[in-house]
Image: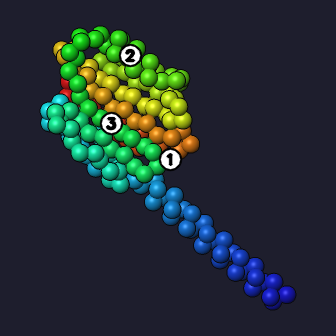
Amino acid sequence: MRLKKQNHSIRKIIGSFTIFILVFVAQANAQQAYTKYCNARYGFCIEYPVNFGKEPAPTNNDGRVFYDNEGCSMRVYGSYNALEHSFKAEMRDEEKGFDIVTYRTSKSNWYVLSGYKDDDIVYIKTYMSRDKSIFYHLRISYPAKFKTEYNEIVSKASKSFNPVL
């Protein structure tokens, strides 16, 4: 009888310890640290995870590409509207890059598209400057199997991406 009580106590301790570890790991994952990238040429900033790598800045300094080792790529850049696209034409052109668009919304000077391309989820947020001369783009793609893991990153990046229009 005494041995059963000891085994029961040991199991309770192990169970409590396991729960503690799981909660600690979940909190550590939920508290992703971010850093900010700002582009002086086009006047935008964005927050991205500190553990992401970044490609070298392009010669024209139009933006940057950030990435991780799981297949996520975050590209943020500005571009002149040299072809004088309308806002809706730019959105239609972006839609052509998807296999399936599952979400779309727009306001007077921005739009968001999300959907699938091959095995990836793709999220695009684009702004147009007031004078219609510049597009500001945020494009995030990541393996669909990691959707839950990347929701916070996409949300944080999207909310922090607010160009000076």
Specify whether 138 is left or right of 4.
left
Q: Amino acid at mark 3?
A: Arg
Question: In the image shown, does 165 or 99 lie closer to the viewer?
Answer: 99
What is the crowding at mark 3: few (fewer than 14 residues within 10 Å), some, or many (at least 20)? some
Q: For mark 1, what is the residue?
A: 149
Find out whether the residues at labels 2 and 3 contact each other: C-beta distance under 8 Å.
no
Q: Label 1's element?
A: helix
List x then y, in percent, for residue 17: 60, 73
Q: Amino acid at mark 2?
A: Asp
Residue 107 vertical position relative to residue 13 in the rendered view, above or below: above
Q: Kindly identify which numbered label has been placed on residue 93.
A: 2
Q: Residue extending furthest front?
A: 59
Tell me which residue sits at (50%, 29%) in the image.
117
| Mark 1 → mark 2, Cα distance in angstroms | 29 Å
Name which of mark 2 and mark 3 comes first in the sequence: 3
Specify whether 23 is left or right of 155.
right
Q: Kindly identify which numbered label has been placed on residue 75.
A: 3
Q: Amino acid at mark 1?
A: Glu
Q: Is residue 103 visible?
A: no
Name which of mark 3 and mark 1 comes first in the sequence: 3
Question: In the image shown, does 85 or 18 lie closer to the viewer?
Answer: 85
Residue 83 vertical position relative to residue 56 in the rendered view, above or below: above
Q: Label 3's element?
A: strand
Name which of mark 1 and mark 2 comes first in the sequence: 2
List x then y, in percent, for residue 96: 44, 18
Tell me which residue sits at (34%, 16%) in the image.
90
On the rendered image, what quadrant is the C terminus found in? top left
Specify whether 40 is left or right of 159.
left
